[in-house]
């Protein structure tokens, strides 16, 4: 069994500083095999905000894989945004924008969906789809996990523009047997099948881990346990704007055959 912690949308610069230590303590207490962070480490891609994100990562005991979000590129500095949009992210978080993890049980592929030419809307580049599908097609019996900032599909009522290339990417990922898609961006927690009910792949959204832009739900993150017959998801959230993360009842979702 693999245990994954899924964090997203930390937004240092608009974070609730009182939640940083409790989040780190709770994640370390869960002793996950991996911590997966699906983007938006910062609010405005400033060096001091990235330094805070780097400090949080350094205090996590598990290995961390991450992708940038749309807030991790300079917004107002247009030359930097167009010529070196991920320079500060690379310096503080990781040089690899699309890391991969593999062992005997799992293949985790991360996709950079942040688009310097768009303010919020994501882009799933065809070359990224091809790279990830090639990895997953060789995964055999191992679980296939995708991490991206922007969701492939969105919950009802979302006002965000859908990611470019998402529909075709979702179709191809289902063909190569994706088991789990982890994303953020919406500041909304949500679980749904990828495509129609009964199709392969489970989408799991994390809300914002630390931001004070709560959008009618508490700060939260996910613990995901990949079991032989089921994917178990437990949401950890701050109840009534408290300063500790409390688990909800776990939900089990059958694995696709």
Image (cartoon, rainbow, N blue to C red):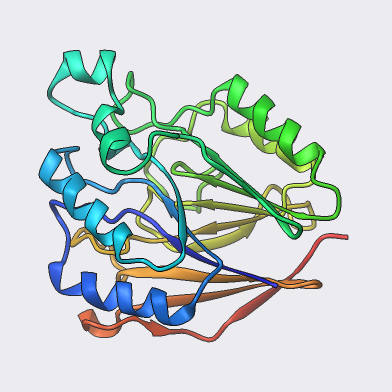
Residue at the right extreme of this rendering: 257
**x, y percent for residue 141:** 85, 55
Q: Residue at x 56, y 67 (%)?
A: 33
**x, y percent for residue 207:** 38, 61
**x, y percent for residue 93:** 32, 44
Residue 109 vs residue 9, the one in the foreground: 109
**x, y percent for residue 21:** 22, 74
Q: Residue at x 33, y 81 (%)?
A: 245
- Which image quadrant for residue 192? bottom right
Q: Split into 4 quadrants, where in the image is the C terminus?
A: bottom right
Residue 5 vs residue 241, the one in the foreground: 5
The relative height of residue 118 versus residue 138 in the rendered view (above or below) is: above
Q: Split into 4 quadrants, where in the image is the N terminus?
A: bottom right
Q: Residue at x 27, y 27 (%)?
A: 87
Q: Residue at x 66, y 34 (%)?
A: 132
The relative height of residue 67 versus residue 205 in the rendered view (above or below) is: above
Q: Is residue 174 left or right of residue 206?
A: right
Q: Is residue 90 left or right of residue 132?
A: left
């Amino acid at each position: 069994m693999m245990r994954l912690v899924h964090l997203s949308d930390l937004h240092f610069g608009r974070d609730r500083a009182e939640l940083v230590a409790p989040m780190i303590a709770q994640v370390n207490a869960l002793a996950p095999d991996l911590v997966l962070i699906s983007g938006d480490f910062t609010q405005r891609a400033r060096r001091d905000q990235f330094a805070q994100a780097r400090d949080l990562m350094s205090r996590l005991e598990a290995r961390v894989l991450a992708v940038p979000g749309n807030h991790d590129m300079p917004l107002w500095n247009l030359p930097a945004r167009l010529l070196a949009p991920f320079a500060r992210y690379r310096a503080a978080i990781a040089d690899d924008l699309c890391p991969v993890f593999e062992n005997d049980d799992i293949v985790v592929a991360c996709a950079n969906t942040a688009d310097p030419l768009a303010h919020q809307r994501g882009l799933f580049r065809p070359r990224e789809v091809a790279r990830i599908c090639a990895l997953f097609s060789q995964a055999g019996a191992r679980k296939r996990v995708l991490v991206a900032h922007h969701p492939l599909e969105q919950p009802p009522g979302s006002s965000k523009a859908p990611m470019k290339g998402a529909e075709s990417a979702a179709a191809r990922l289902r063909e190569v047997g994706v088991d789990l898609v982890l994303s953020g961006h919406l500041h909304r927690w949500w679980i749904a099948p990828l495509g129609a009910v009964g199709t392969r792949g489970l989408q799991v959204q994390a809300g914002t881990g630390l931001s004070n832009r709560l959008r009618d739900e508490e700060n939260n993150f996910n613990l995901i346990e990949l079991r032989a017959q089921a994917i178990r998801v437990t949401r950890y959230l701050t109840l009534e704007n408290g300063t500790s993360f409390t688990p909800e009842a776990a939900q089990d979702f059958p694995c696709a055959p």
